[in-house]
Image (spheres, rainbow, N blue to C red):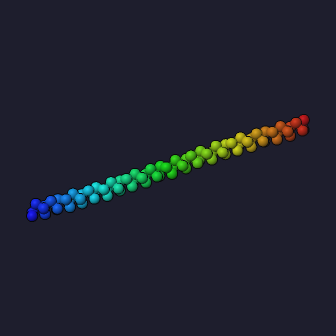
Amino acid sequence: MSNVSEMIEELKRKRDELRLQMNLASKDAEQQWHEFSAEWDKFLEQTQFEKSREEVGEAARELGHKLKDAYDRFKNRNA
């Protein structure tokens, strides 16, 4: 009987150890997920900034062309 009791105790201990390892692994995986999520958010922010910057640049170029055309028309009318 003691062999069975010893085996049960050993199996309980191993089960508890595995449960602890799984919990620690889950915490590590959760931490990594949070880090990856933060990096993803930074990436999206940066790409949105780049997109906005391109849009602003395009709008500025378009405005510049319109101003140039307006100046040229004004100059030609008053020449």
Residue located at (64% from left, 43% from top): 54
Quadrant of the image occupied by residue 11: bottom left
79 with respect to 26 (left or right): right
Q: Quadrant of the N terminus?
A: bottom left
**Viewer-proximal residue among 69 and 74:** 69
Residue located at (33% from left, 54% from top): 25
**Viewer-proximal residue among 69 and 26:** 26
Residue located at (10% from left, 60% from top): 3
Quadrant of the image occupied by residue 21: bottom left
Percent x, y for residue 59?
A: 70, 44
Marks counted in the figure total 0
Q: Quadrant of the C terminus?
A: top right
Percent x, y for residue 44?
A: 54, 49
43 with respect to 9 (left or right): right
**Viewer-proximal residue among 15 and 55:** 15
Quadrant of the image occupied by residue 30: bottom left
Residue located at (51% from left, 51% from top): 41
Percent x, y for residue 51?
A: 61, 45
Percent x, y for residue 67?
A: 78, 42
46 with respect to 33 (left or right): right
